[in-house]
Image (cartoon, rainbow, N blue to C red):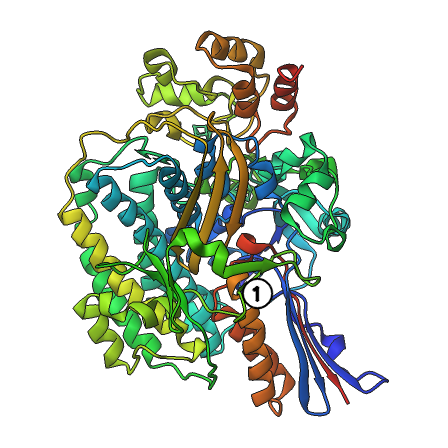
Amino acid sequence: MAARKKPKLAVWKFASCDGCQLSLLDCEDELLEVAGVIEIANFPEASRAVKRGPYDISLVEGSITTPHDAMRIQKVRRMSKLLITIGACATGGGIQALRNFKDIKDFVSIVYARPDYIETLTKSTPIDDHVFVDCELRGCPINKYQLLEVISALLNDRKPNIPKYSVCMECKQKGNVCVMVSKGIPCLGPVTQVGCDALCPSYQRGCFGCFGPMETPNTISMSERFGELGIKADDIIRTYRTYNSYSESFRRESEAYER
Amino acid sequence: MKDKSAKKPDKKKTKTIKVDYLARVEGEGAFNIKIKGGEVIDAKLKIFEPPRFFEAFLVGRRFDEAPDITSRICGICPIAYQMSSIQAMEAAFDVKVHPQIRALRRLFYLGEWIQSHALHVFMLHAPDFLGYEDAFQMAKDHGDLVKMALDLKKMGNDIVILIGGREIHPLSACVGGFYKVPTKRGLESLVERLKWGIEASVKTVQFVGGLTFPELAADYEFVSLRHDDEYPICEGRLVSNKGLDIAISDYDDYFEEEHVKHSTSLHAHIRARGSYFVGPLARFNLNFDRLTPLAQEQAKSVGFEPGCVNSFKSIIARAVELVYACEEALRIIQQYEMPPNAKVEVKPNGMTGYGCTEAPRGILYHRYVVDGHGIIRSATIVPPTSQNQKTIENDLFNFAQNNIEMPEDELTWRCEQVVRNYDPCISCSCHFLKLNIERIE
Ligand code: SF4
Ligand code: SF4
């Protein structure tokens, strides 16, 4: 019938909140169309039908936090032609990487009465610590239009257009008044990668870095600026330690204030 | 997903049906049903979601970070987490917000109910009743219905986006109010769509009311919030059909959580009584009199009345709540006036705060101890799915027992459906659902 076979898409979940994969179902206007051009071969959140691999595109959500998952991601990689990480959990370890700065044993015993039932790794790590990643989408959650862009670029053999500059640029383009200059609100926009359409400043709050560090962020002068605004060291640490706390530059900067 | 090899009878004459993932639930889990000599001997819902330790790393964070951080527990109901944590903090610090801020929160939350219910009714649950593997297949035969579902879901999302900036982990809500509130004109852009939404929801009730429901009944204890004059969403007392009627600050005296070996999600139960049932069916049964006349009339028109104890009919409760949610959202928008301030100032003190709101899947309880500097010293979060876990296991047990003669493929699918009756959000409680029916002969 059809001349070309539909490419197969699989969605995988590791430690996460499901928000990033839900973005796919949130493409209400495009969903049925997407389902028409690609074969949704493995997407447990939406379907009980599962087709065997290999898959042309794998979307991977979540971070690696258990020994079992560390093995499972290897299998996923072997079954996937292209592997795309979606969201801060997968690209940076996610909010659950806050454990990386503490003793995990204390964490387990705060939440669970029987720590011996729990199997977990001491660190929550991003997917590219474990396997080769072809393309990553930032954000907690990702921007669904970036997701559609990546899928359509890959289907058409072109490079996805995912800019890597800072939130500040987008914020200025939008004509926002800078919340840091005008109101003294601390904002991570200058060091955070774009993709959200500068949402937080548009809602009168500072960016909290959910898209993670941009390419070569100047976090040192960012923190100095926070200092000038009267932000204390503890709060500076907390500012870098949210959804991308384990991304290299945010981690280094927060650790610098811990000493 | 079925493992075909498992269908072959094995040498020890133990028949096993194995499903690696329970699909169409938010998250991953497993269940195990053991059948011996025609009797079900055990049914366990296993949850293996990698633990994420929210309650541990909240310790040492600032009180005003709780709404954003806890919303990352679940991408399907982030507003529920934001609202329960905000309520807890505001209760601790005795913060009073403007009535329009309160109304706006309710509207925001209704947006989440609409998107979540539309998703579950049509995309996750209806395919079970009609025998499709998923909504994509269902769309081939019921295109108009799936299209309507997507539009309804999108409308719910658009309410959330308008108030909160984005549909998943919206970012405008905070302790004390909102960072920014919408204008009246902004909200009015939703009026025509909500009117359509009411009609679409009515069609939804009629559609789900006409489905065929497998038989299942139990002597449940339904628990939900109850408010003096509203259908409960953001606040109320905790009540049940067995006489519970308490302030949410007394939650810990009546409920407890237990850590069981087969789950990384804690099991909650009522002290000295056992399992209970939260969610749309519980809300409907306990608050029918607080629904709008249209929602009541719609429920009755399909023979769905309070006192219903068939959990398969939760899908009707969701549809009826869709009617209510669209009407209530419309009412709030029509009466909206932009409040003078988006938020009030909050002064933290060393207090304990309790919050409990009705997430789409049922009550979500938060408790925080905050010190005088506004730093969280302890946090407890009890999501709806961990409260329903024991009830789901009981349903599985009873359903498998009553249908022990059913062919295994069908029994497997029906049991999955039993779990999906609760729309379990395993991200909330934890993740990983495997289905396993074991017959020992
Ligand atoms: S990145 Fe954020 S939205 Fe995405 S799965 Fe992780 S916690 Fe959820
Ligand atoms: S402004 Fe920053 S924190 Fe806000 S959505 Fe964008 S990247 Fe995320």
Q: Position of residue A190 (x, y in %)?
A: 48, 17
Q: Position of residue B9 (x, y in %)?
A: 78, 85
**Label 1 CB less than 8 angstroms from ligand 1:** no
Chain ID at mark 1: B
Ligand 1 positioned in quadrant: top right
Q: Residue at x 61, y 78 (%)?
A: B412
Q: Which quadrant: the N terminus of chain A?
A: bottom right
The quadrant holding residue B141 is bottom left
Disc 1 is placed on an element classified as loop
Q: Which is more toward the observer, B141 or A191?
A: A191
Q: Which quadrant: the C terminus of chain A?
A: top right
Which amino acid type corresponds to the residue marked 1 in the rendered image?
Ala
Q: Is residue B237 above or below residue A201?
A: below
Identify the residue under disc 1. B23
Q: Which is more toward the observer, A32 or B347?
A: B347
Q: Residue at x 46, y 27 (%)?
A: B372
Q: Is residue B145 visible?
A: no
Q: Position of residue A144 (x, y in %)?
A: 45, 43
Q: Is residue A238 left or right of residue B294?
A: right
The quadrant holding residue B294 is bottom left
Q: Is residue A234 left or right of residue B64?
A: right
The quadrant holding residue A103 is top right
Q: Is residue B368 above or below residue A247?
A: below
Q: Is residue B331 visible?
A: yes
Q: Which is more toward the observer, B144 or B393?
A: B393
Q: Is residue B396 above or below residue A132?
A: below
